[in-house]
Amino acid sequence: MAAQVVVLTDQRLEWINGRRRVAVNWTSDTSTGAVSAVLPEIHGFLDMVTTDAGIPAPTAYSLTLVDEANFDVLEGVCSTAGGGADRSDMLTQTAVPKFGQLNTLLGLRKPVWDVLTLKIAGAGTGSGRNGIVILDFSQ
């Protein structure tokens, strides 16, 4: 079965009090364990990424969020290939994106001004492996 993706946004793509949340419910491709989802165009700052495995749980997987130039705006914080950590197959995890080599907790914010594609790799083959990715943005 091909990957399935449902992109949900708070308040139909509107900014509420300077914040916007995009939630992506995903089910991986049964033969490759991959997922790809094009998100609505975002103009703002990416503050946080939260991931949670569903049931049946995926294996530990990598997550990237690439812009139109194919640059991972998460700068590898959600994949071992990028120097970060793969997402857990059991735990809810939150990651704060980097701005260059600095963590955005230092006050720097990750600008996003593009159509983004969420990519998941290595979620495991088999029936119905799924989860949710929540992206929090601010203006």
Image (cartoon, rainbow, N blue to C red):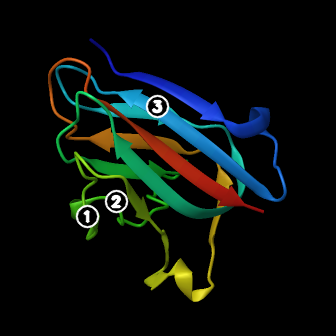
Element marked by disc 3: strand
88, above or below 39, in the image: below
In this image, 80 relative to 45: left or right? Answer: left
Neighbor class of circle 3 (other Cα within 10 Å; few <14, some 14-19, many 20+) is some
Element marked by disc 2: loop
Q: Are marks 2 and 1 in contact (CB under 8 Å)?
A: yes
Element marked by disc 1: loop
Instruction: Kindly identify which residue carries mark 1.
Output: 85
- The picture places residue 124, in percent across and down from the top left corner, at 16, 33
- The picture places residue 138, in percent across and down from the top left corner, at 72, 61
Instruction: Kindly identify which residue carries mark 3.
Output: 25
Looking at the image, is mark 2 or mark 1 earlier in the sequence?
A: 2
Q: CA distance from mark 2 to mark 1?
A: 5 Å
Looking at the image, is mark 3 or mark 2 earlier in the sequence?
A: 3
15, above or below 38, in the image: below
Q: CA distance from mark 1 to mark 3?
A: 21 Å
Q: CA distance from mark 3 to mark 2?
A: 17 Å
Neighbor class of circle 1 (other Cα within 10 Å; few <14, some 14-19, many 20+) is some
- The picture places residue 29, in percent across and down from the top left corner, at 27, 22
Instruction: Kindly identify which residue carries mark 2.
Output: 78
Residue at figure coordinates x 16%, y 20% from the top left: 31
> Which amino acid, by three-letter code, is at mark 2?
Cys
- The picture places residue 2, in percent across and down from the top left corner, at 31, 15
Which of the 4 quarters of the picture holds residue 59? top left
Which of the two marks, 3 or 2, is nearer to us in this view?
A: 3
Residue at figure coordinates x 27%, y 29% from the top left: 55
Q: Are marks 1 and 3 in contact (CB under 8 Å)?
A: no
Looking at the image, is mark 1 or mark 3 earlier in the sequence?
A: 3
